[in-house]
Amino acid sequence: MSERHAINTWLRLFLAIAPNLVLFAAMNFLPADGQTRGPALISILGNFHILALHLPIAFLLIVPLFELLDNTEAAQIGTRRLCMAGAVSAWIAALLGIIYGHFNGFEGAELQDHLYAGLGTSCWASISWYCLHKSRMVRLIVQFIAIITLFYAAHSGGEMVHGDDFPLKPAKVSTPK
C-alpha cells in the first residue's frame, strides 16, 4: 500500500487560484451582452446553472457549522472534504452561470452584480479551502466571508428571477372570498 501525502502549500495555492482565473477569462471571452446565441449544446449546458447553484449553498453553509460543533481530527477530515466540495461546486455554478448569461441573451447592471458576486463566492470558497491548515479562527472568518458573498449572489440572482424584494415578498397574494 502506498502512503497518501498532503498537498504541499504551493500546489494548494495553485489549485485555489487557477480555476478562478479561468472564470475571469471566461467572463471576458463569453460576455453577457444581450445576444441570444443558442440553441447549442453549450447553451443547454448553461441552463444547469439553476440546478448547480444549490450545491455550493448547502456545502458552504454546513462547513462552518461542522467547524463550530466538532473540532476533533475525525470531524476535520469530513470538514476538509465538504470545504473542497463547496469550492468546486461554487466554481462549477459560476462557470455555468457565465455560459448561461452569454448564450441566453442576458445583460444589465443587475446581471453584472450577480456575476461578480458569484465570482467572489467562488474565490472566497477557494480561499476557504486553501486556509484549511490555518488556525480555526482564520478558517471561520474566511468561511463566513464566503457565506456573505454567497448570500449576496443568491439574493441578486433571486431578484432577477423572482422580482424585487425577493425573498421577503409573499409568493401568492391571497384574495378574500
Image: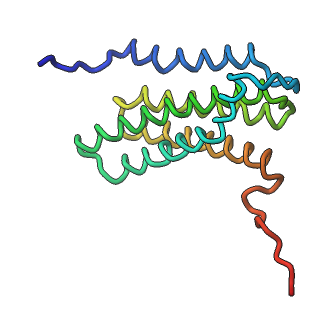
Q: How is the image coloured?
A: rainbow
At x 53%, y 42%, the residue is 55
Left or right of 167: which side holds 67? Answer: left
Where residue 128 appears, x then y in whole percent? 46, 32
Where residue 110 appears, x then y in whole percent? 82, 38
Left or right of 22: which side holds 164? Answer: right
Where residue 149 appears, x then y in whole percent? 63, 39
Quarter of the image with the C terminus in it: bottom right
Q: Residue furthest left?
A: 1
- Between 138 and 175, the residue placed more toward the observer is 175
At x 41%, y 29%, the residue is 131
Left or right of 177: which side holds 51? Answer: left
Question: Which quadrant of the view contains residue 82?
Answer: top left
Quarter of the image with the N terminus in it: top left
At x 57%, y 29%, the residue is 92
Q: Is residue 154 above or below residue 25?
A: below
* Number of marks drawn: 0
- Between 175 and 31, the residue placed more toward the observer is 175
At x 56%, y 33%, the residue is 90
Q: Is residue 150 above or below residue 116?
A: below
Where residue 151 appears, x then y in whole percent? 63, 46
- Between 143 and 84, the residue placed more toward the observer is 84
